[in-house]
Image (cartoon, rainbow, N blue to C red):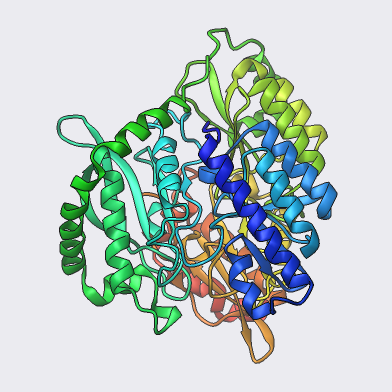
Amino acid sequence: MYDYADFDEAFVRARVAQFSDQVERRLDGSLTEDEFRPLRLMNGLYLQLHAYMLRVAIPYGTINPRQMRQLAYIADTWDKGYGHFTTRQNIQFNWPKLPDVPAILSALADVGMHAIQTSGNCVRNVTADHFAGAAADEIEDPRPYAELLRQWSTDHPEFQFLPRKFKIAITGAPNDRAVTRAHDIGLRMVRNAAGEPGFEVLVGGGLGRTPLIGQVTRDFLPVADLLPYVEAVLSVYNTLGRRDNKYKARIKITLHETGKEELSRMIEERFAELRPLFGGNDQRLLDDIRAAFATPAFRNAPDGAYDDFYKADPAFRSWADTNLAPHRAPGYAIVTISLKAHGQTPGDASSDQMRLIADLAERFGHSEIRISHEQNVILPHVHKSDLPALHAALSQAALATANVGLISDIIACPGMDYCALATARSIPIATQIAERFQALDLEHEVGPLKIKISGCINACGHHHVGHIGILGLDRAGVENYQITLGGDGTETAAIGDKMGPGFAYDQVVPAIERLVRTYLEKRDGAGETFLMAVRRLGLEPFKEALYGESARDAA
């Protein structure tokens, strides 16, 4: 993975010193809160419902064991012993005290981390496929390109005050595990007729108040043109994007109001101007970055006792069936460590769990760790012979829940338990759904099903692209939960359809159960997933389950 160069180190240290001075001036009253607010947001510090919250960048979800241990140290020293991993592959600390924030930022800088551009109307943390560099279906590791974008966009003088925040996602595989179609710019690696790798470019995706799927502006962009083309998109958006209404300021609205054809023409015109200015400097930098992402020295060894453990141990077999993914190297597997133990807050990890994951990455995983946008942790390179020992260690730390991709592997924002913007609770709904289906012993029978929950219209829980989406709203001071169906965040992306009137807090879990039981009753064999059934059957059978006479009686 990429390590800080001297320039990175100097830049981050200077920013820490600058913000330390700003914090001192806020504490002594020299700065008002209104004056301090844009300064703290530039450094990832929010004022939430109960306390400050610090959002730390984990670029493209890649982190090493030393950095993970430092996050655990920060959690123990200046927070409450845990951190929350988010849908942008970041980590949030929910309880830092303002006087301690400079020390936290300095501790992050010690291990090549920061909180720069995790807030504000700028290019936010670039996210990537959490299986990058390991997936069997991958055309090319997208992380060098993500790092190139990170370096280019950090403190870019033209793009620090965009009309609104700007999010980029990138995947190196045809199977989209980065939700690229729901981003301001989505980059999906493809091959042209000559077999050369390049990017399908999508512009104007986004969730929130006006959910839209991104539209293709380039079917094939050569990899050498990535930076000038992305800069062209941002340059056009920075000129056209609305600044009179923050709800209409995202590039998805710009595209809608301008039209895809005209916006594409303007992007191409700007691209033609910018392309010669790069002069190959970006490609030389990219070559240096690629060297930092060299493939680990994989072991050429037999699988050992893996097959025997798989046959003999039901708990190991269940975990292997759900939490392992195919690896590009023979004898290896990609391991997803679930942070969704039944009844626990999705995405939370204690300091002890972070330290254990760091230890296990060093022992079994070539010292590589990834954070997924689905709020889990990945060990991307584990030899199959090590899987039984890894599973045993995870089991002792409550990290071996066999539920990845299943109904309890829920994405949930912090909701009204933490967030000042939230209008409803998310975490309790998520934990109750997980516990209900664990008690019913239906989770594995149901199979793949993605539930996503947001506590407000900002959609940080990505509910629009959940197979079942849940949006918490405030209706005259009472929590009300709207359900959507048929969303999809993959290469076949779709925005879920609203099902009808919302449900009271205590009616949500029974409503979800009715949806799932309808699926089980009407599916065309065990091979038809929930999403496949919704697409085949349409919404009516599920609406009847939610709102029919018997459903109303049950509610």
- Image location of residue 536, percent across then percent down: 37, 58
Closest to the observer: 543 or 214? 214
Q: Is residue 244 above or below residue 12?
A: below
**The one of 353 and 444 positioned closer to us in this rendering:** 353
The image shows residue 230, relative to residue 26, as above or below, that is above
The number of numbered discs placed on residues in the rendered structure image is 0
| Vertical position of residue 421 compared to residue 104: above or below | below
x, y percent for residue 459: 53, 68
The C terminus, quarter of image = bottom right
Image side of residue 476 versus residue 212, left or right: right
Tell me if residue 97 can be seen: no
Residue 383, picture quadrant: top right
Residue 298 visible here = yes
Q: Position of residue 134 (x, y in %)?
A: 48, 28
Residue 40 falls left or right of residue 215:
right
Q: Residue at x 78, y 71 (%)?
A: 27
Q: Whole-percent x and y of residue 215?
A: 27, 60
Residue in the foreground of this view, choosing between 176 and 109: 109
| Most distant residue in the bottom direction | 476
* Depth order, front residue of 528/101: 101
